Image (tube, rainbow, N blue to C red):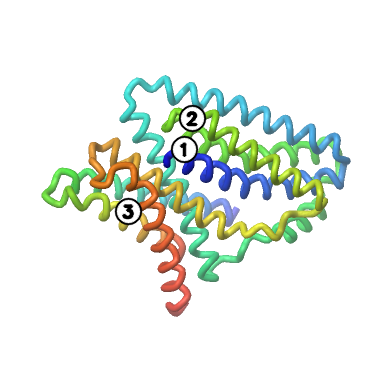
Amino acid sequence: MSDISVIITSFLTAGVEWVEAFTIVLAVALAIGWPRAVLAAFAALAVLALMTLFGAHAVSAIGSMRVAQFIIAVFLLLFGLRWLAKAIARGAGLKRLHDETAAFAALSHSTALAETHGAMVVGFQGVLIEGLEVWLIVVALGAQTGHTDIAALSAIAALAVVAGAGLALRAPLSRVPENTVKFLVGCAILGFGTFWLLTSLGYDWPIGDSALPALMAFYALGGVAAIGALKASPQ
Amino acid sequence: MKALLKTLFGTATALAWVAGVILLANRTLASPARPFTGIIVPGALLIGAALLARR
């Protein structure tokens, strides 16, 4: 179960971040051409790959498994809490939905893309910043389950899918239901974080590993209820 | 600048909430309510997400 959860969570997290990164690379490519835009994107991906190797090594260097589990759980809880909160706010209409077409239009008209070197820096930074969340999830889920390779391959598969779809369309992938995906990823990450936090503190889950999908379902149902309650409450 | 401050405040609030949840988990595990830790902690995190969403 854990491996399937790692694959799905890594794929979805990476997918939604690569969609945002693709919008930036597309705007850069239309300004300075595909070769330079792709070069900037690959440079950022190379940095992320090195960071993944370093991160996995750093986590495995922590002597105590419980300490590593606790540290990873805290990061996942922080990250998951913010993702779920943002998705709830957007679902309830308290925050505007992320619009890839608008983001693309704003970046395309930006003066930052007027000059080749500056545009390449924008492309590099964009992919690196969007990829940092992917890196965190791949390292956290991979190191904890002992399958960094599986988590990394899932993120690479998501990259291939997004890049393939984006290159075929030559347009921002605005039809991807980003908020729904972020909501699901937030629930999954909070589930992993809660499971590992309490395990590291010595809690024995009464239903064993089945607690992980149960936690994810709890956050999903609770999140939907929170969206409904926030929609109904006066602003 | 306003967006950066908002992001920093959001991160600090989430950090404070998670720290509070860890303390709560520790206390619950050391109390007679220990069997219910697996319900109390996710409940506290869900409330935190809803409150952060409302902010």
Q: Which residue is mark 2?
A: A147
The amino acid type, in three-letter code, at marker 2 is His
Q: Which residue is mark 3?
A: B42
Q: Dot 1 falls on which chain?
A: A
Mark 1 and mark 2, same subunit?
yes
The amino acid type, in three-letter code, at marker 3 is Pro
> Which of these two is toward me, B31 or A173?
A173
Mark 3 and mark 2, same subunit?
no
Q: Residue at x 30, y 49 (%)?
A: B21
> Which of these two is toward me, B27 or A179?
A179
Kind of element beneath mark 2: loop
Left or right for A151, reference A230: right
Is A109 situated above or below A167? below
Is B11 situated above or below A202? below
Other-residue count near label 3 (Cα within 10 Å), few / some / many at <14 / 14–19 / ≥20:
many
Q: Are marks 1 and 2 in contact (CB under 8 Å)?
A: yes
Q: Residue at x 41, y 51 (%)?
A: B14
Q: Nearer the viewer, mark 3 or mark 2?
A: 2
Measure the alpha-carbon separation of dots 1 and 2. Answer: 8 Å
Measure the alpha-carbon separation of dots 1 and 3. Answer: 22 Å
Measure the alpha-carbon separation of dots 3 and 2. Answer: 26 Å
Kind of element beneath mark 1: helix
The amino acid type, in three-letter code, at marker 1 is Asp
Q: Residue at x 65, y 28 (%)?
A: A47
Q: Nearer the viewer, mark 1 or mark 3?
A: 1
Q: Residue at x 43, y 32 (%)?
A: A145
Q: Which residue is mark 1?
A: A3
